[in-house]
């Protein structure tokens, strides 16, 4: 993520940054999975559809939802309460999970031939890969705004 993308949040109060993350990323990721999982299930029986993709997506969704819940129920309330400097351990855990999410995105790229469906495939398959592409880009931005802006600022304040 470039600094320009989150420059409006460089000096915004931390609750504003957290509100943005919740609305722009947490809600959007949940919507993306609500769209992509049924598409993946519909495509799973198609010839040449990656057999490991659907189970992988279900696992990724569960892991991400667990991560979002930890942020929403533990880390963000600590930051809201002005306890950011005491949240070093939860932030460390979130960073490790961010690393795991980035590894999962690499695996997703492998499973989908870098999000390239076969030439003569269904519209559903193409739509699935487009939603996955949007999810990937959003997740990378989400990780960046937390790792590069929210966490460092919360530890200082």
Image (spheres, rainbow, N blue to C red):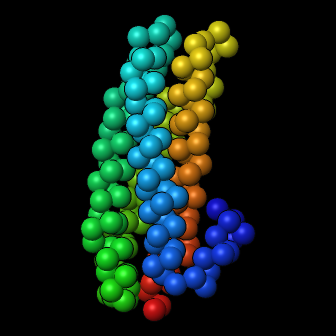
Q: Residue at x 47, y 91 (%)?
A: 156
Q: Is residue 132 visible?
A: yes
Q: Nearer the viewer, residue 63 or 76?
A: 76
Which image quarter: residue 99? bottom left
Q: Nearer the viewer, residue 48 or 9?
A: 9
Relative placement, left or right, of 140 versus 22 is right
Which image quarter: residue 140? bottom right
Q: Nearer the viewer, residue 82 or 110?
A: 82
Identify whether 153 is placed above or below 114.
below
Q: Residue at x 33, y 51 (%)?
A: 65
Relative placement, left or right, of 6 versus 111 is right
Q: Where residue 57 appears, x then y in whole percent?
A: 39, 34
The C terminus lies in quadrant: bottom left
Identify whether 91 is placed above or below 96.
below
Q: Residue at x 64, y 62 (%)?
A: 1
Q: Residue at x 58, y 58 (%)?
A: 141
Relative placement, left or right, of 141 versus 66 is right
């Amino acid at each position: 993520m470039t600094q320009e993308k989150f420059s409006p949040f460089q000096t915004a109060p931390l609750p504003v940054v957290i509100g943005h993350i919740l609305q722009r990323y947490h809600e959007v990721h949940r919507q993306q999975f609500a769209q992509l999982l049924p598409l993946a299930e519909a495509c799973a029986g198609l010839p040449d559809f990656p057999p490991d993709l659907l189970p992988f997506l279900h696992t990724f969704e569960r892991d991400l939802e667990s991560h979002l819940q930890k942020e929403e129920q533990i880390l963000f309330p600590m930051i809201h309460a002005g306890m950011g400097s005491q949240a070093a351990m939860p932030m460390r855990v979130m960073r490790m999970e961010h690393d795991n999410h980035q590894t999962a995105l690499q695996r997703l790229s492998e499973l989908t031939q870098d999000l390239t469906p076969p030439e003569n495939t269904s519209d559903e398959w193409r739509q699935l890969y487009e939603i996955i592409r949007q999810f990937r880009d959003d997740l990378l931005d989400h990780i960046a705004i937390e790792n590069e802006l929210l966490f460092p600022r919360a530890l200082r304040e």
